[in-house]
Amino acid sequence: MGIGIFGSGVSALNAAQIGLSTTEHNIANANTAGFNRQEVVLATRFPQATGAGFIGQGVDVSTVKRIYNEFLSNQVLQGQAQASQLETYYQQIGQIDNMLADSDAGLSPALQELFSAVNNVASSPESQAARQAMLGSAQFLVSRFQSLNQRISDINSSINGQISSSVTTINSYAQQIASINKNIVLAQAAFNEQTPNDLLDQRDQLISQLNKEIKASVVKQSDGTFNVFIGTGQALVVGEQAITLKAVQSFSDPSKVEVAYGSGTTFARVQQSSFQGGNLGGLIAFRSESLDVQQSALGRVALVLADTFNQQHKLGQDLGGALGGNFFTQPVPLVNTNVANTGTATVSASIASSVALTGSDYSLRFNGGTAYTLTRLSDNTVTALATLPQTVDGLTITTTAGAVAGDSYLIRPTINGASDIAVAISDTSKIAAAAPIRTNASLANIGSGRVSGGTVNAVFPVNANLQQPVSIVFDNPPATYTVTGTGIPGSPVAGVAYTAGAAITYNGWTMQITGAPAAGDTFTVASNTNATADNRNGLLLANLQTKNTIAGGTASYQGAYAQLVSQVGNKTHELELTSRAQTSMVNQIIQTQQSISGVNLDEEAANLMRYQRAYQAAGRVIQTANTLAFCFVIREYFAKRNEFAAGRQNSSG
């Protein structure tokens, strides 16, 4: 019996010792990231059958189990990926929000200053100081556009760098996970399929870190390895093999870095929107949903301003008597030919109507024959084009021959608007503040007819006979009149019916005659000479400040910019709230997870005492067993000696 007690005591001693070691391991790793507490799993040994019943033989340590809740861990992973994406998106868009909304660095003060200067020229068209101030204000506005655009371009370059860095980090995590997969398989094979808890914790921690970079899903294999998938199901880790991501230059837009997927030297380009979650997902979402959109929206304001201001300026007359030219350098659409195209066609785009521009980018794809498909990327609206050229959303698209089916082109109508706008004139005398025509009523008129100042029609190119003299003489009776002048088809044109206040349009101008002219009364339209004090076109230029010229005529320059600032501000506020809420939710899940899997030092201290006492008790058992064994040996010794002595006595007798 002593030997049985001894064996049972040794098993208890071993169990207590392993319990102490496990508790010490938990305490030592209480602050180790990703560590799950461990506990000893004990099982009774198979009892010894005797006539008196089954007698226990002690305890065995079955395994050391980590306390792990797979459901909560998956919840943490899902929440972390979303929280990381929102946080990254919020941090990036915050830069744009601060820039656009800055009362000093934003566009609003520059727009206001330009039109204040235009109003001053309209008030004093002959003032060289006012004209110089107008050019200076225009240059300041242009500089502000370019500065804002440059800042956005710098952010885009930063995004490229961050995407490349994120890809490097993801590849590193993938390699480490694949390596640990291998070590787990080896460890389980070497130690009778026992679970290497610390390796599992390290792998889970790596997956958690990976998940902060990109949303990852995990599938456990029968051999204990994890297969890790990203995007729309692309494998990143398969057993002991890691697949590589690579940051590559975009085929359609050389200014962007994209993420390609592959193995070895072969990389496949995939839809960038498939990379969801984590820091990488936040960077890609910010760039496509906000950065590009905001740069195009800012560019649209600049492009429409340049176009509409130029159009009105060209309808005026400068101090030298010449028709006005372009006041601003007109930005043009950008067309990128996909690097993977096999054809030789060249696609170009021009602005047919700046008012109709949407601010969206477009993807043009050649289908074969003469057919193309145009996709508006802001809402994926598809327009089938039987042939080119065609005009869509104020954009005229043309092409040369040589396209091959499948060739594609990225058309960005307004992306360079803010960077390419410039002041086209430097001579103050070239500011066309006057109108190029002047109407006149003959002093010999005896009727009550009155003539309006006349306006130049916004038709380009301007009529070549715009400033040619035209006379209107009322017939007898004065219910009709005769029109005579260069450029008038069929001149003189007699018998034109007179309606008071009706528009009279010839040679690219329109004017009205009101009242009751008498027979023989004469009205003329001719070139505006000595017009240094004429401000009619200056007033029309000033009126552009409040005129709705953007987004189909629904917004002014200032209104469109304010809308851009509001959209960015609202998106920033939305991300701030959702990011904060998501982070809070993740923290709550982590707290729940840690309440189960985390190390509680008070509990471990109690376990130390418990296992210490168990160890001491097991020692006492062994001591008792040792004493019993000694007594048994002594008893056997004396019994044998007595038996030997009795044998000798019998022999002597």
Image: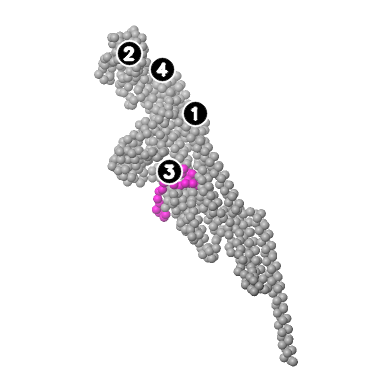
The residues colored magenta run 263-285
Tell which circle, 2 or 4, labels the residue nearer the N-terminal end: 2
Return the residue at label 4: 533
Mark toward the viewer: 2 or 4? 2
Return the residue at label 1: 109
Q: Amino acid at mark 3?
A: Lys
* The N terminus - image quarter: bottom right
Residue 618: x, y in percent?
A: 68, 66
**Does the residue at mark 2 contact the one at mark 4 (Cβ under 8 Å)?**
no
Q: Residues within 10 Å of mark 1 (few under 14, many from 20)?
A: some
**Does the residue at mark 3 contact the one at mark 4 (Cβ under 8 Å)?**
no
Tell which circle, 1 or 2, labels the residue nearer the N-terminal end: 1
Tell which circle, 1 or 4, labels the residue nearer the N-terminal end: 1
Q: Amino acid at mark 4?
A: Ala
Q: Name the residue: 53% across, 42% down.
A: 579
Return the residue at label 2: 523
Q: Amino acid at mark 2?
A: Phe
Q: Name the residue: 49% across, 36% down.
A: 568
Mark 1 and mark 4: span between their CA atoms? 28 Å
Viewer-closest of 13 and 34? 13
**Does the residue at mark 3 contact the one at mark 2 (Cβ under 8 Å)?**
no
Q: Name the residue: 52% across, 40% down.
A: 575
Mark toward the viewer: 3 or 4? 3
